Image (cartoon, rainbow, N blue to C red):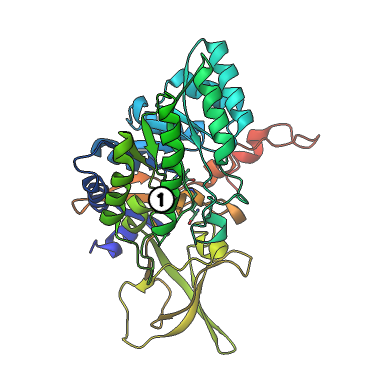
Amino acid sequence: MANYAQLAQKYHTPLFVYNFDAITQSYTTLKECFEGYKSLICYALKANSNLSLIRHLANLGSGADCVSFHEVRRALLSGIPKYKIIFSGVGKTLHEIESALKADILFLNVESESELFLVEAVAKDLGVEARISLRVNPNVDAKTHPYISTGLSSNKFGINHEEAFKLYLHAHKSPNLLPVGIHFHIGSQILDSAPLIESALKIKELARGLLALGLPLKFFDIGGGYGITYTDEVPFNLQEYIKNIINIVKPLDLSILTEPGRFLVGNAGILLTSVLYEKLNGTKRFVIVDAAMNDLIRPSIYKAKHEIVALNPKSKEVSKCDVVGAICESGDYLAKDVNLPDCESGDLLIVKSAGAYGYSMSSNYNSRLRPAEVALTNGKDTLIRHRESFEELIEDELLLLDENTDKVDDIKGSKDV
Ligand code: LLP
């Protein structure tokens, strides 16, 4: 195990620590599932978009699944070649579409009729043929948390089969659209592969019909969503699942593209935090730490459970407590009713499985500064994002001038605060 005490001393807490060797391991495990079949792994940047982490995946051969043009820019900056970058999302702006087409990325995953028409118009203006794929909503229940379930008609994502078929025919006829892919993504943290297989079978039928009509499809994009173990979850067998997918897709002779986020980075990261205080409210025990919901919001919004362990427990005896942060909300907790030994101020706790949707969902709520991020490669630690400073926190704000305040800098540069 990494020397977290040393890391805490060197970089202070709260601190995200990512084991890049573990990322290599999960990337390789997934890539090996596809051995002997054409595939492209496009890492979903939304899980963790730190540039060094993306670069690490780029070096392994990964592509990128992006949900904003700024994510596309992050991918390009980190060295992912444009021909391995795809752009998904229900709300791409005109500017984002224009930029993506100019950047000449692999394809855009289009999510509605109006978006398709906009892509077509922009491509026409630019005099290019836009490579597109349609995100088809298979109306299958991924059986995951409702906030991260995306494959039902009641969700905002994708296009239903009938409409997708029509739109594919339109794209096929258009001189400015090139339909190269077909896509589904039904949710995240999926622990049962049956809904994924059911979706793949439905999409396959659609793809088969389109290929028969001469559409130039090349990619069968199965999305991401592979669940991981946080506490006691049992993920489905990935090898078996991919084997099934290959069997489904092979007859179509399409490349398989997948967009995992959490699977690649979730269990490779931890959030290191220091105990500030312990208190009892009546009989209820609270351990108050220096990380909070602004650093890791998953417990607060999804009731997600992250295992928390004491780095150097002073005794073997444990008792139930809530691990909470300093934010002025009762929903600010990292864990509820977990067993921890007695803690003292300065003790270190490790919040596990914090590599995905941790930093990338963090905020400055309560004017808290965002933590630093450290990469571990072969046991060596490297700072990959410094801790935010107060100056950075306020740097984008413009102070409304009044007659008593003639210069913004007078206040921002003040040494008194
Ligand atoms: N592709 C698309 C189109 C997606 O919307 C997502 C995730 C992914 C791929 C990657 O999914 P993954 O392999 O990471 O499950 N904030 C939530 C998760 C939201 C996922 C959103 N979309 C959480 O903390 O659990």
From the image, which quarter does the N terminus lie in?
A: bottom left
Check the image and name the residue furthest to the right. Answer: 403
> 286 or 46: which is nearer to us?
46
Q: Specify few, some or many for label 1: CA neighbours under 10 Å numbering under 14, 14-19, or 20 or more.
A: some
Judge whether 408 appears above or below 389 on screen.
above
Residue 275 % position (x, y): 44, 71
Q: Residue at x 61, y 46 (%)?
A: 156
Q: Residue at x 40, y 45 (%)?
A: 386
Residue 354 % position (x, y): 40, 58
- The answer to whether residue 28 of the structure is visible from this angle is yes
Question: Can you tell which quarter of the image residue 222 is in?
Answer: top left
Residue type at mark 1 is Ala
> 141 or 191: which is nearer to us?
141
- Helix or strand or loop: what does disc 1 sit on? strand
Judge whether 299 appears above or below 391 on screen.
below
Question: Can you tell which quarter of the image residue 326 is in?
Answer: bottom right
Judge whether 174 appears above or below 132 on screen.
above
Residue 15 % position (x, y): 39, 56
- The answer to whether residue 73 of the structure is visible from this angle is no
Judge whether 36 appears above or below 19 on screen.
above
Tell me: 286 left or right of 402.
Answer: left
Label 1 CB sits under 8 Å from any ligand 1 atom: no
Tell me: 25 left or right of 359.
Answer: left
Q: How many marks?
A: 1
> 343 or 192: which is nearer to us?
192
To which residue does mark 1 refer?
Answer: 372
Residue 34 % position (x, y): 24, 44
